[in-house]
Amino acid sequence: MAERQTPDLTSLPMRAALARGLTTRRSVMTGALGIGATMALAACGSAGTKATTSGVASPTAKAAKDMSDTEKLVNWSNWPEYIDVAESGGGHPSLEEFTKKFGIKVNYTEDYNDNDEFYAKVRPLLAAGQDTGRDTWCSTDWMVARLIRQGYVQPFDLANIPNHGNVDSSLLNVEFDPGRKFSLPWQSGFAGIAYNPKATGGKKIETVDQLLTDPSLKGKVTLLTEMRDTVGLVMMAMGKDIAKFTDADFMAAIDEIKKAKEAGQIKGFTGNEYTKPLASGDTAACIAWTGDVVQLQADNPSLGYVLPETGCTLWSDNFVIPALAKHKKNAEILINYYYEPAVMAQVVDYVNYISPVQNTKEILTKSDPSVADNQLIFPSEATLSRAHVFRGLSEAEEAKYNQAFQSVVTG
């Protein structure tokens, strides 16, 4: 492996399907309830239960009276820079087309910067049986697993989502939601290494070891607040398999991250907010998500991005509809709209993440071949071979690992 050269992935050809959701990221977390998982669900859960993939019953999300027919509105929370934007710099063409076509206004809010941060905002409301003020949002695989098992998200009415069959087959029967009854992927991608050559003195940053130990990067490195991406990349750099790691493997990676932080190598941990410092050079190198960097490269082609030879993580963010959402049907109409291949192609052409919808590559091959040929948007089998998913965690592991990671992030 040391003899292979790390490729510049922005120049290689790609493929449309993503193996990422097969059973695991930002990974499929069967049994991943997290630190707050054992808390009472209060009024949020109804008297009914549903079976999980592990066979353990969990609460059924409570439904509100659906106001969709009288209130032509849907409230959608999403990650920053994760939807198409008009060339003039204002508005989202796909959303405007949706409103024009269906007469439904979309309140689109970019307030999802980190899974745990967002969960901390909505969980008290969900646990108290209160409306979150949102009809849909996009959570990463492992967080979706948690939300389903806690009874915090509702099953889809598939009569309102006839395009459900357009989901890529590799993403259909995921471990946390077989058949995609509670979730549908919005976008998928990798976590790798980004760097600004202007801030690195022209040096390529291609390994996790460089991030953690290179003295020329001291105080100019950021890692992600996503535990599975940051610790996953570090474990792989240590030669561990993130699908089979032990407690000792995880804690050894935590020790390496802690050592780098205490040495002043790491200036912080971020969600999507790493983009501006990376572009300006205030951050020299960081663990970063593919689509963010491809977008930044449109304005600054010199920015570098690599998937380490030791391995990268693979993930999906997914539509869910929370308990007590007031416009559930409208949210389902919205989700169905984005599962039109031409509409998803329009989004992918802008955000540059991996499409979960079949036949989008064929559309982009005709309309924007540079995107269809980009290795970070339509990955080849060779690229996917270095992408790995973080194994499922038990409730106890989730609590223990989160606590260990957060002690480094906040300590």
Image (cartoon, grey):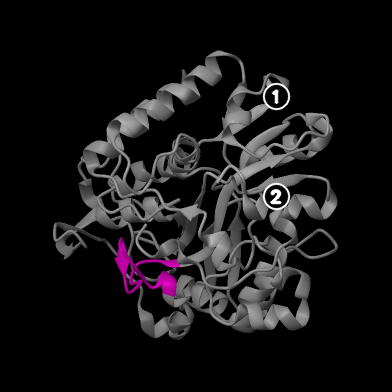
Q: Quadrant of residue 180?
A: bottom left
Circle 1: residue type? Leu
- Residue at (30% x, 50% y) in the render: 392
Q: Which mark is residue 45?
A: none
- In the rendered image, which residue does mark 1 sit on? 217
- Residue at (34% x, 61% y) in the render: 23
Q: Is residue 354 above or below residue 125?
A: below
Label pair 1/2, CB-CB below 8 angstroms: no
- Residue at (35% x, 49% y) in the render: 243
Instruction: Pinpoint residue 177: horizontal percent, then vertical percent.
Output: 31, 65
Instruction: Pinpoint residue 167: horizontal percent, then vertical percent.
Output: 47, 77
- In the rendered image, which residue does mark 2 sit on? 293
Secondary structure category for the residue under label 1: helix
Q: Residues within 10 Å of mark 1 (few under 14, many from 20)?
A: many
- Is residue 35 visible to us here? no
Q: Is residue 203 above or below residue 321?
A: above
Q: How many marks?
A: 2
In the image shown, does 221 or 317 lie closer to the viewer? Answer: 221
- Residue at (68% x, 61% y) in the render: 351
In the image shown, does 316 or 218 lie closer to the viewer? Answer: 218
In the image shown, does 378 or 155 lie closer to the viewer? Answer: 378
- Is residue 157 visible to us here? yes
Q: Residues within 10 Å of mark 2 (few under 14, many from 20)?
A: many
Q: Is residue 145 above or below residue 96?
A: above
Q: Nearer the viewer, mark 1 or mark 2?
A: 1
Circle 2: residue type? Val
The magenta segment is: 170-184
Secondary structure category for the residue under label 2: helix
